[in-house]
Amino acid sequence: MFKVQNTVLAEEIATTKFACDLPKCKGACCVVGDAGAPVSKEEIPVLHKAYRLLKEELRLESTEVAEREGVVIGSKKAGYEVACVNGAECIFVKYDENDISYCAIQKAYYEGRFNWEKPLSCHLFPVRLKRIADFDYANYEYVDRLCSAACTKGEKEGIYLAEFLKKPLIRRYGKEWYNEFLAACNYIREQEEK
């Protein structure tokens, strides 16, 4: 573990090579699992707004779940998550012609139709944050069937997870934090090579 300001991070975040390979994994992180993406209380109104915008574009199964169970499920005590179809597939998932899943919110963002890219937990995956007291604890959540292709691609292209997640980490913590974090990652890698 290493610390950057008020964030405690697993060393694997500094040392793992990782770069998503959508043609190989087919967006499995959006459709495989036993729960929806964790979301903060502050993200809930934005997700409701996204649902209202995208409802007509989503799959029937997704809108049925959203109308029956809500866009976000959970509680303050248990935590909140995006609702899922059959307990696994995010309600905002759509598929392209190659059967690759993608986020309808992110697509709308890239098209300039929505001003928010996607939930932070999705943007940061495979890093998961847990808030305890005044600290964020960041862990690398490697799931072989989801991440093996990304690790292979990261290794081949020499891309570290820390750099791959630059945009969402800056989104969460800011540029100053990210620069300090990157310096710490480089130090850890240098020590590992000795």
Image: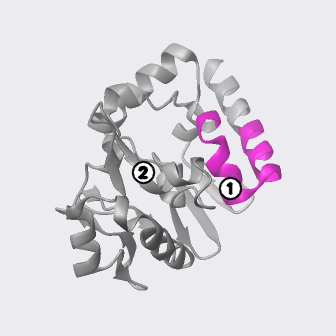
Is residue 23 depicted above or below 72 in this figure?
Answer: above
- Quadrant location of residue 163? top right
Residue 92 screen position, x and y as percent: 37, 59
Would residue 53 be counted in the magenta stretch? no
Residue 138 screen position, x and y as percent: 54, 54
x 59%, y 64%: residue: 136
x 27%, y 79%: residue: 67
Residue 176 screen position, x and y as percent: 83, 51
Is residue 98 depicted above or below 80 in this figure?
Answer: above
Q: Nearer the viewer, residue 134 or 52?
A: 52
Extent of the magenta region: 163-184
Say what secondary structure mark 1 lies in.
helix
Q: Which residue is mark 1?
A: 171
Q: Which residue is mark 2?
A: 103
Number of numbered markers = 2
Judged by depth in the image, the label closer to the viewer, 2 or 1, is: 2
